[in-house]
Amino acid sequence: MKKRYVIGMDFGTLSVRCVIADALTGKTVAESVSEYEHGVMDDTFLDGSPLKSKIALQHPLDYINSMKSTVTECLSASSLNAEDIAGVGVDFTGSTVLPVDKDGIPLCFDGRFSNEPHAYVKLWKSHSAEAEANAVTALAEKRGEPWLIGYGGKISSEWMIPKILETLNDAPHVYEATAEFTEAGDLITRLLTGSSARTTSFAGFKGIWNDETGYPPNGFFCELDMRMDGIVGTKISQNVRPVGEIAGYVDERGASLSGLAVGTPVCLSILDAHAAMPALGISGERELMLILGTSGCFIINDSAAKNIPGICGKVNDAIFKGYYTYEAGQSCLGDGFDWFVKNLVPEKYTVAARESSVSIHEYLRSKAQKLAIGQSGLLVLDWFNGNRSVLADYDLSGMILGLKLSTKPEEIYRAIIEASAFSSRMIIDNFSDNGIEIGTIYASGGIALKDEMMMQILADVTRREIHVSSATQAGALGSAIFASVVAGIYANIKDAVKVMSVPSARIYHPIPENSQAYDKLYAEYSLLHDYFGRGGNDVMKRI
C-alpha cells in the first residue's frame, strides 16, 4: 500500500509545531508543540551579559531539540512508525539568519564562538541592523538599482543582507570564519538531508534576490563594504531553487537529529506565513491571507507584476506557479498586547482574572467589549516594534494619544487592538490603491481563532468579510501539503489543496454602524500615521 501520511513542521518565534496529516483525506492525525528552551534572547545573552539594543537572538540547538521532540510525540500519538511517513515539509520564520561552517553546522557550536552573540541566530524580529538597512537602501537609491522598487522602495533591518553587514561591522572575526550565512529554514533542510539549497521564498522576500537578475551585482556589495567583495557564491549561496521542489532525502545525520527514517523526501523550506496559504484553501489570486500572531503578515497572489510601495517584496512562483506573491506586514501584533499586560496592567486586574478563572487577556476583553467606539478618547500608533508596512521604518516607536487620569487599562487595551485594525486597513488600502484587487480575506493564527472581539473590530474597520480558518496549526498543515507533492501523492500543490485544505470556522461580517464610527477614527489615525511616520515630525526618533 502506498504511503499516505506526511509531516509538516512549523518553526515559529517561540516553538515548533508539528503535525502528521493523512494526505488522502487531509485529516490531521497527530500534532505536537515544543517550546524553545532558550526562547528569545533580546535583553541578556546566555552568560547574563547585556545585549545590543534591538537585537533578538536564538540558540539553534533549540530548533534541533524541539524538532525531534515533536516528531517523536506525533509518531507516538498516531501509532505510526517513521517508515510510514511519505514526505516532510518545513516552514520557518524569516528572515532568521545564522552563520554556519562548511558542513552546515551553526558557528556557535564551535567553542571558539560559543560566547559570541553574532555567531548565534538573528531572529526575524532583530532590528539592531537598522543603520545597515538604511545604508543598503541609500546605496541602492544612489546607484538606481532596479530591484529596490520590488521591495517597496526600502530595505528592512529584518532581512538577511543588513544582518550580515551588521555582523561584518560588529564582529568581523565571525564574518571571516563563516562559510555561509543561511536562513534557519534552509538550515533545517540541510541538517535533515545534507543538501545545501536556498529557496525562492527566503531568498526572494528576505535576501534581495529575484528570478530575473539574481542577487545585486558584486559592484554593489563592494561599494557597500569592500570586505563583501565576492560574497555572492561564497558566503551567500547562489543555489536558489523554487518552493515546492524536493531538497533531498533524510540521511543518517538527519535521522538521528529528527527521528525520521532515512530516505524520506524533504521539501525545500518556505516562509512560515506563506506555508499557511494552502491550508486555508487559497490557490489563486484576489484572496488575501492574514496571519495574526506575534506579528502580522498580509499575503496575496496576482498574475501580474506590479510595483507596490511599502511592501516587503514580490516574488514570482513563490507559493504557486504562475503567480507573483506580494507580502506586507505588521512587526508588532500579539507582541503589543503581551507587552501591555506584562507591564501596564495593575495587580488588581490580574487577581480578578485569576479569581474568574480566565486569562488576563480574556478579562480585559470582557471589559473592553462594553466600551462604545471612541468612548475612551484614545488613539494609538502601534509601532512598539517599529513599522514594517507601509512605512518600513524600525526606528519609529509607538504612541498612546489622549491619556487622562481617568483612563482605564481596558480602554488602552481596546485602543491598541483598534490601532492594529487601522494598521491592517492601511496595508489593505495600499494594495487596493496600487492595483492589487482584493476579494475574499482569510485569517489564521492564534489571534484569529481566539480573539472574537479583535476579529469583529478588524471586519468593521476594513469594511470586509473575514473568513477565519479552522486550522489550529495552519503553517504546519501547509508544510505537510507541500510534503504530499514531493512525496508523489499529488502532481502539484493545487491538486493537494483541493483535498487537504480545511474549511473556515467562522465568517465575520462588518457591522455598518460600527464601520461608520471607525471611519472617523481611521481618518484621525491616518493623519497621525503620516505626520509622525512620513517626515512631518520625527520627534519619536529624536527622543
Image (spheres, rainbow, N blue to C red):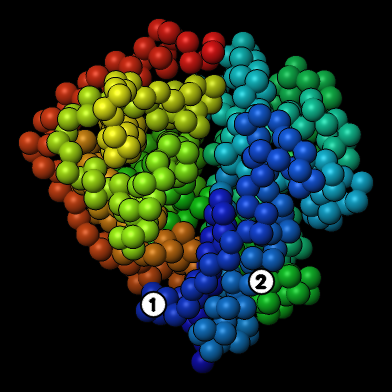
Can residue 403 be seen in the rendering of this structure? yes
Residue at 76% in and 43% down: 48
Above/below status of 459 relative to 494: above
Residue at 71% in and 78% down: 262
Q: Residue furthest bottom?
A: 1
Can residue 200 be seen in the rendering of this structure? no
SS under mark 1: loop
In the rendering, at what x and y percent does residue 1 appear?
Answer: 51, 92
Residue at 44% in and 25% down: 398
Along the horizontal axis of the image, is 518 left or right of 193? left
Along the horizontal axis of the image, is 182 left or right of 441? right
Q: Amino acid at mark 2?
A: Lys
Could you classify mark 1 by the number of other residues whose Cα lies within 10 Å: few (under 14), some (14-19), or many (20 or more)? some
In the rendering, at what x and y percent does residue 28 appear?
Answer: 42, 76
How many discs mark residues in the rendered view? 2
For mark 1, what is the residue?
A: 27
Q: Label 2, label 1: how many angstroms apart (C-alpha)?
A: 22 Å
Q: Amino acid at mark 1?
A: Lys
Say which of 75 and 356 sits in front. 356
For mark 2, what is the residue?
A: 68
Report if the CB atoms under discs 2 and 1 are less than 8 Å apart: no
